[in-house]
Image: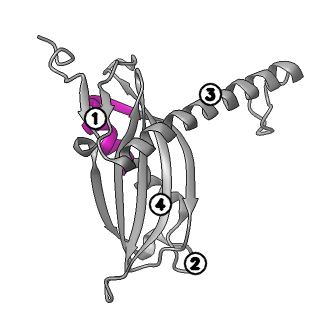
Amino acid sequence: MSSAENQPLVRTVASTQSEMTEIVLPNDANTLGNLLGGRLMHFIDLTGALAAYRHTRTHVVTAAMDHIDFIQPVHVGDLLILKSSVNRAFTTSLEVGVRVCVEHPQTGVMLHVASAYLVFVAIDSDGRRLKIPQVQPETPDEQRRYADALLRREHRESESHRRKQERGATGASDADGCGCK
């Protein structure tokens, strides 16, 4: 029996939840002592991938970071707490939400500092897409995130279609102006 045959057809959101904690060190910061945005994005990607892996039980690759909000700065010495879970699973891809909080180590005060949505694709060891289990939202909050994930997917798809049309209409292979072909 293959590992795909052993996979459940549906997993709960709770079974995908992941948490990662990091202390912000000087090497992670800019000259003002604030966490670099790119470093935070790296932590978000890792935490999101953990939830995606727990859901798919196979290799996953990041296809998109759909949206990220940097709400407030994170300082050297702060404890960064990242929590992720699968919002919705499609045929071979899934959306994961990541919420980032910071805990001030001396006071214990917790602040919400960032949120992001990522899309991962499940693949085999040869890079071929794999079908994945569906996700079952159980709580009202999970059901809201499940419904919102479909709206975000539809928006991503329409935006992708718009960009392709724009490239085709202008005949330009460098529609984003980066100088790439």
Looking at the picture, which amino acid does disc 1 mark? His
Residue at left offset 28%, top offset 35%: 55
User: Which badge, 4 or 3, comes first in the chain's sequence?
Assistant: 4
Question: Residue at the location (45% across, 53% down)?
Answer: 42
Image location of residue 60, percent across then percent down: 36, 32
> In front: mark 3 or mark 2?
3
Dots 3 and 1: beta carbons under 8 Å?
no
Q: Residues within 10 Å of mark 4 (few under 14, many from 20)?
A: many
Q: SS of the residue at dot 3?
A: helix
Residue 40's tag is 4
Q: Which residues are magenta?
A: 46-60
Mark 1 or 2 closer to N-term? Answer: 2
Instruction: Please name the amino acid that badge 3 sits on.
Output: Glu
Is residue 57 among what the camera can see?
no
Q: Are marks 4 and 3 in contact (CB under 8 Å)?
A: no
Question: Which quarter of the picture shows residue 109?
Answer: bottom left
Amino acid type for the residue under numbered disc 4: Leu
Q: Earlier in the sequence, mark 4 or mark 2?
A: 2
Name the residue at 70% across, 24% down: 161
Kind of residue at disc 2:
Thr
**Left or right: 67 as drawn, with respect to 9:** right
- Along the line of sight, which residue is nearer the eye, 172 or 56? 56
Camera-nearest label, 1 or 2: 1
In the depicted structure, whether residue 31 falls above or below residue 123: below
Position of residue 98 measured from the top left corner of the image (x, y, whole percent): 42, 52
State the CA–CA distance, disc 1 to disc 4.
23 Å
Element marked by disc 1: helix
Q: Which residue is mark 2?
A: 31
Q: List the residue tagged with mark 3.
A: 157
